[in-house]
Amino acid sequence: MSSSTMSLIGLYNYDNELFKFLTVPDAVDKSTLIDTILLRGGEFEVLYSDYEFMQYSIGAWSRKWTPTFNRWVNALSIPYDPLENYDRNEEWEDTNTGTQTTTNTGTETTTNTGTQTTTNTGTQTTTNTGTETTTNTGTETTTNTGTETTTNTGTQTSVGSGNETNVRSGSETDQADGGNTTENQVSAYDAADYSAHDKQIYDTDQSNTHTYTDVTDTHTLNDITSERTDDLTAERTDDLTQERTDDLTQERTDDLTQERTDDLTAERTDDLTSERTDDLTQERTDDLTAHHEGRVHGNIGVTTSQQMLTAELDLGYWNIYEKITDLFLTEFVLPVY
């Protein structure tokens, strides 16, 4: 290679690992920095035309300037207000030691007159969860003594209408035991007394059997009214004692939600006078330490806000990639076209 004709871009095109050993802070993008260096100084002749030596020199140069690069990054990262030129932080402690005494003597009177209205609107929800146990142990005695009288007065009426039907089936037997005699008597035309006419004598142990084959007797009720009038008194005298012994446990598990919606207005009219007489002494001993921190910032007036704004805009032109490129080109190229 001829050292008199080698440019930076030529050396890079020969092997793009030229910047292999270049180190930069984390906040600086290495690819952007390399592109900036090639754009600004790619046509310039390099100071060291030996590729490997140039590659090594770039690494040594970046290590030398790394502390400076870090300072630039840190300075540009400091938070600040561009329109303020005064910023001071302070810390101090106050200690209070001694005795403080306050005495109140006199009368305090408060009078409340008017109407106080309270309105509650919304939903109140109550949830009960768990187990409720009730145990009853002992003797319960109930005694009833006296007279209980019940009197029924009035008219009870029953009305029947329609047909009443009785159906008979089977046999019916009439049994007669002993003798049975029938005698007919008549009176003669001209006689005052009766005389026998004929006489019939029946044998003993007679029986008559009647056979029914689904005989139906029907009675028709035509709006028959049965009426009864009562004026009765029922009287009962009790002298009873009821005794009950309980040894019971009632257990109830509730998982209930009670919801209540209130739209209530409570109104109260007060015409009250509250009077209080104080003759009090309050004594307080303090041994306290108070810690305070404060910050004072703003514009103290030496520089106007417009001047500080102009300085802020000028600072915006300060570019860390351009500044590092300036150092690189000064170190490694001959700026001759």
Image (cartoon, rainbow, N blue to C red):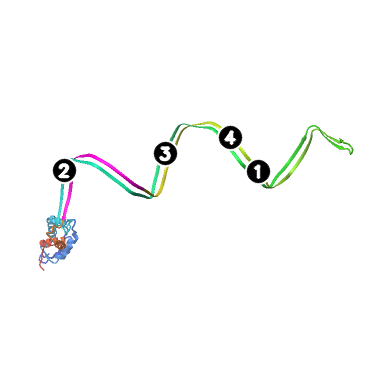
* Quadrant where the C terminus is found in the figure: bottom left
**Main SS, magenta residues:** strand
Residue type for callout 2: Thr
**As rendered, which of 54 and 91 lies closer to the eye?**
91
The mark nearer the N terminus, 3 or 2, is 2
The residue beneath circle 4 is 235
On screen, residue 275 above or below 85:
above
Does residue 287 belong to the magenta stretch?
yes
What is the x, y in percent for residue 92? 15, 47
The residue beneath circle 2 is 95
User: What's drawn in magenta, residue-wise?
Assistant: 268-297
| Element at label 4 | strand
Instruction: Give the farthest residue toward the right.
Output: 190
Q: CA distance from mark 4 to mark 3?
A: 46 Å
**As rendered, which of 44 and 83 lies closer to the eye?**
83
The residue beneath circle 3 is 132
Residue 20, located in which quarter of the rendered image?
Answer: bottom left
